[in-house]
Image (cartoon, rainbow, N blue to C red):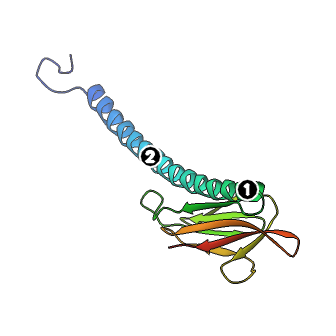
């Protein structure tokens, strides 16, 4: 077995146990890194999904024609993390944990509360009204903070 006749462990057994401990520690490190990567991927996919949802809503309002309106409520957090979301005439941008993503929208003029601008930050936990209106012969999507 693992002991000689005098009851001492053999060197082979000790080396085998040492190698198994080293391999086990390596496996724990690899598994921990993979779990962290899965968690980060989950957070980023939630952020991307939110950007796609807002972009899809803007596109639906645009396609609905003059007077079409949809309300959208943003979540407080994505998972347990905060995020930034902003919109301009070319897309919806999201940032979470230092990483950014973009969801494209059909090119359209966007109006934010009181003026045109390069972009509008949509705040987490707020509800927004997206409204399609004609303004000087052009289609404009109005984004108004409801609450």
Crowding at label 2, few (<14), some or many (≥20) Cα neighbours within 10 Å? few
- Which residue is at the far bottom? 114
Which label is found at residue 59? 1
Q: Quadrant of residue 109?
A: bottom right
Q: Give the camera-side residue of 81 and 146.
A: 146
- Which residue is at the far left? 6
Instruction: Count all numbered tags in the image, as a single digit.
Output: 2
Q: Quadrant of the N terminus?
A: top left
Pinpoint residue 87: horizontal percent, then vertical percent. Answer: 68, 69
Pinpoint residue 78: horizontal percent, then vertical percent. Answer: 48, 59
Q: Are the residues tagged 2 and 1 within 8 Å (C-beta)?
A: no
Crowding at label 1, few (<14), some or many (≥20) Cα neighbours within 10 Å? some
Which is more N-terminal, label 1 or label 2? 2
Q: Give the camera-side residue of 26 and 131.
A: 131
Q: Quadrant of residue 145?
A: bottom right
At horizontal 48% and vertical 45% (from top left) the residue drawn is 34
Pinpoint residue 144: horizontal percent, then vertical percent. Answer: 62, 73
* Residue where numbered disc 2 is placed: 35
Dot 1: what SS? Answer: helix
Q: Is residue 44 above or below residue 118?
A: above
């Amino acid at each position: 077995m693992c002991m000689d006749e005098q009851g001492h462990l053999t060197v082979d057994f000790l080396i085998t146990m040492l190698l198994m401990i080293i391999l086990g520690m390596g496996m724990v490190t690899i598994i921990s890194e993979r779990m962290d990567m899965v968690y980060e991927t989950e957070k980023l996919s939630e952020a991307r999904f939110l950007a796609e949802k807002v972009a899809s809503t803007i596109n639906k309002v645009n396609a609905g024609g003059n007077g079409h309106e949809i309300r959208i409520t943003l979540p407080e957090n994505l998972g347990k993390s905060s995020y930034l979301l902003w919109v301009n005439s070319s897309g919806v941008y999201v940032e979470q944990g230092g990483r950014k993503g973009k969801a494209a929208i059909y090119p359209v003029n966007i109006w934010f509360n009181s003026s045109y601008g390069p972009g509008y930050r949509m705040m987490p936990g707020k509800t927004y009204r997206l409204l399609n209106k004609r303004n000087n012969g052009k289609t404009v999507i109005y984004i108004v903070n409801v609450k």
